[in-house]
Image (tube, helix red, strand yellow):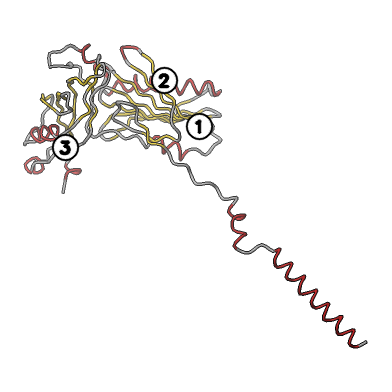
Amino acid sequence: MRGTTGKTRTLIHLLSFIAYLIICLQSPAAGSQQPAQNSTDPKPQSEWLSFTPETASFSVLMPVAPSERTKNGKNGIKVHTYTAKAGRTEYQLVWLTNVPQGILDRSSLKVLFPRGLEEILKSAREFGSKDLVTTHEANITLNGHQGRESIMQSASATIEAKGFIEGYDFITLAVLHPKDESSAADSKRFLDSLSLPAFKLAGSTIGVDDVGASTDAANQVDARPIPLNRPRPNYTEEARKNGIQGVVRLRALVGTDGVVKDTRFVTHLPDGLDQEAVLAVRQMRFKPAMKTGRPVPFWVMLEVEFNIRKRAR
């Protein structure tokens, strides 16, 4: 009996050990638990796209590739609208080109900025926001370009927008988003992403071939010159000593090879800064103006800024 009892105990111990091994094998390893823990983590923010319209000298960031619409506006102005939607938020870039020189001054912001907001306001009405009220509006600048910003709100939506004069163009960035969504960071990212050139490029109203050409001829090109580099003008010691700052405005004739062939001063600065402005412009290279598929000479208006704080070494 004692031998039988001993064998029984041994068998029980063996079965218990086998059961323990089975439990261990069925239990997940510590390392295998990690994916389950991470499955609830938020996905990383998607990369935004850098977007530059064809023939434009500026760029912006957008969450997705935008759709494009172009129409002819009043006074010969062309309206290019680029729209991108992410969820319930709509991003708009409105580019007004061929703006007449007669309205391109600071007072024109009161005219051009509302025109740049027409499409986003239309979207807001379709969204159901008809009671928008302006809660903020102010004049701003970006890299020397005059601009304006505003915030409009209704019970359900918000529109944040910025617009800038760039040469003979006007650029508006606007975001429409529901007030109940935390999209302020994305809105700011879009509005702050606008990159404008240090030199202000504009299609000249002087002409295409020479200084005596008509204004209408300048508007007949299919694409105006686009700067490919941004040479930094030198600051003369005399100008720095005398505290001379400001902007030299001049017209430059861009040849069919993209090289500046001639310059004409519009405004001046003393102490050798005029000459330094010309030297900097002469170093610029452009994608030439195009007409019916062929490069053509074209006059552009350039502004060269001299700022002691920026140029100091």
The tally of labels here is 3
When the figure is inspected, residue 236 is found, relative to residue 297, above or below; the finding is below
Which mark is drawn over residue 306? 3
User: Disc number at residue 69?
Assistant: 2
Residue depicted at 16% across the width and 46% down the height: 312
Answer few, some or many: residues within 10 Å of disc 2's Cα (few below 14, many 20 plus, some between 14 and 19).
Answer: few
Which of the two residues, 257 or 232, is positioned nearer the viewer here?
257
Sequence-first tag of 1 and 3: 1
The answer to whether mark 2 and mark 1 are in CB contact below 8 A is no
Q: x, y (%) of residue 115?
A: 38, 19
Q: Are marks 3 and 2 in contact (CB under 8 Å)?
A: no
Query: Which of the two labelled residues, at mark 2 and mark 1, occupies the earlier sequence position?
Result: 2
Q: Which residue is drawn at 42% across and 23% down?
A: 68
Which residue is at 11% across, 26% downward?
261
| Badge 1 density bin: few <14, some 14–19, many ≥20, Cα 10 Å | some
Regarding residue 115, the answer to whether it shows in the image is: yes
